[in-house]
Image: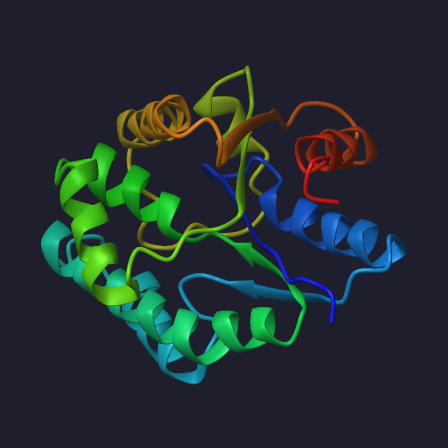
Amino acid sequence: MSTGRFISLEGGEGVGKSTQVTALAEALRHRGKDVLVTREPGGSPGAEAIRSLLLSGAGDRWSMRAEALLFAAARADHVEKTIRPALAAGRWVLSDRFLDSSLAYQGGAGGLGISQVRALHRFGSEDFLPDRTLVLLLAEGVERARLRDRGESDRIGGRSNAYHLAVEGAFRQVAREEPGRVRLVDAAGATTSVTGRLLTALGDLL
């Protein structure tokens, strides 16, 4: 049986992440990989129920601590019910967001501290980590990124520019601290060019 791999795709609002999840999954399938695409929050029935709580309602519906706990609970169910079984079956799992979003959004930008949010992950998901995390970044900055976001913002995506700049800074911090796992990828340019960069960043795993 082939060895499964777990890849997470991360980034701030409007960097083209959802487009690249689809494109990267197709590129991996062309290379003979059996790919399961999933997302966070969500990816299992229990986690999808929590997703609706997290992303709907007023911006102040949850305190930052409550928000982090809800994400950790959803992730624990996602890992147990979806990700680990797929990997055990030899599949490649590609997730639209995972732990690093919590580290950046609630830990860094939200002021809880990256180490505090990581501690929740150690308890909830036994510190289960992707084989590779790819973070899409736009050199133009968050304001340009948000202009590219065609959909309506949810309660987290609609936060201030200052918050989203802090999110980007936190992603960069995590990448500095874990260079073996986390790779920063330029999200500018044509979709095919960005997908090519993602594949290059996965080269040692293919």
Q: Nearer the viewer, residue 56 or 196?
A: 196
Residue visible at 28% across and 62% down? Answer: 126
Q: Quadrant of residue 189?
A: top right
Residue 50 as seen in the image, left or right of residue 186: left
Q: In x, y percent, where is residue 205? A: 68, 43
Q: Nearer the viewer, residue 29 or 84?
A: 84
Res 169 seen here: yes
Residue 22 as seen in the image, left or right of residue 82: right
Q: In x, y percent, where is residue 92? A: 66, 61
* Vertical order, 138 against 58 (above or below): above
Res 63 seen here: no
Residue visible at 64% across and 28% down? Answer: 187
Q: In x, y percent, where is residue 20? A: 68, 45
Residue visible at 36% across and 69% down? Answer: 51
Q: In x, y percent, where is residue 3? A: 67, 62
Q: Residue furthest front?
A: 1
* Vertical order, 93 against 141 (above or below): below
Residue visible at 35% across and 30% down? Answer: 174
Number of numbered discs visible in the structure rendering: 0
Quadrant (top left/top right/bottom left/bottom right) for the N terminus? bottom right
Q: Residue furthest bottom?
A: 45
